[in-house]
Image: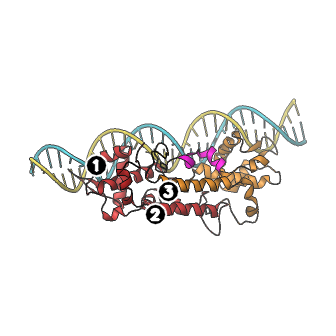
Chain colours: A orange, B red, C yellow, D cyan
Amino acid sequence: MFSKTCEYAIRAMIFIAQKSKDGSKVGIKEIAKGIDSPEHFIAKILQELGRKRLLQSVKGPNGGFYLDDESLQCSLADIVKVVDGDKLFTGCGLGLKQCSETHPCPIHHEFRSVRKGIQTMLENAKLGAFTEELEKSLTFLKR
Amino acid sequence: MFSKTCEYAIRAMIFIAQKSKDGSKVGIKEIAKGIDSPEHFIAKILQELGRKRLLQSVKGPNGGFYLDDESLQCSLADIVKVVDGDKLFTGCGLGLKQCSETHPCPIHHEFRSVRKGIQTMLENAKLGAFTEELEKSLTFLKR
DNA sequence: TAAATAAAAGATAAAAATGTCTTTTATTTG
DNA sequence: CAAATAAAAGACATTTTTATCTTTTATTTA
Ligand code: FES
Ligand code: FES
């Protein structure tokens, strides 16, 4: 469904969202541990998300990553688009050069509908909305 | 969603299904052309599907690939399982080691539902069912 | 201002996916 | 049986993804 990179990205962003709720910042080491990912690899991913303004960071002592109020409103769909592109949302399920109503593959209609379901799910999932269940350990970001 | 390998596999199997309807066999060159895929690459994939009995073939002059009546009842889900494994049907959307009710990731419930939708779509899509629309050029397997 | 800190950036490296080419084996046909 | 045919198998190459390690830049604090 998602690339490994994208899975890490989503987990990291949800992790940072949780830590950001009280205004604190979180370092890359803690993030990597918190989501069980390679430290330098997730660092690269977060740099990219930072360049695209989905995430904030500050260097130096007491620095780290955080999400401002706007970023907390980001949806998982926003993250997926930045990391994996929009193939998942607009591409043909059978790999035709483009998904098209006038030149459809054999599963076009059914696929379009499940693809829409995925998109809706991801667009409705805002980063700020996961904190509570994580705090209560009802959901998890690793293992 | 699917690997490139799996996209080719599904397109090839639908192509062969169409040619098999009247009992004829089809060679690897024609398949590769018909679905716009690298010839030797799709050959490998079909060998694997043959070993798993999802597809029949005969060597030598007038040989080629075909689907018997049982194989025509195969679903796209069967192909996906052979080629990509069952990660798509049972794996965690965020890449946790396993998807679990008791140790769920933050999107577990929503993801499980769209995942189920995908599975249902693929299980209901039988290879024998695509022929008619292909014949009428209402659907396409390349470009 | 100097030292410490932490992210950003750059350079490699390893692994997996994708693609190509050659040789072998099985089958048919003359 | 010999030649032709076509899939099966094996070897190799390229590209992309995933992961690791080092250097640089920005910021804070003493
Ligand atoms: S053309 Fe294949 S999904 Fe639309
Ligand atoms: S635990 Fe992530 S989808 Fe079930």
SS type, badge 1: loop
Is the magenta region chiefly helix, strand or loop?
Answer: helix
> Residue A11 in the image: x percent, y percent?
67, 54
Disc 3: which chain?
A: A
Q: Position of residue A106 (x, y in %)?
A: 43, 52
Kindly identify the residue that appears in the image at 74 percent across and 47 percent down. Answer: A71
Amino acid of disc 2 = Glu
Which numbered disc, 2 or 1, marks the residue closer to the eye? 2
Magenta residues span A77-93
Q: Nearest the camera: C15 or A46?
A: A46
Residue topped by disc 1: B27
Q: Position of residue B64 (x, y in %)?
A: 26, 52
Residue to which mark 2 is pinned? B123
Q: What subunit carries mark 1?
A: B
Residue B75, numbered circle? none
Residue at 38% x, 48% y: name it: B137
Residue A91 covered by magenta stretch: yes
Q: Is residue B102 left or right of residue B16?
A: right
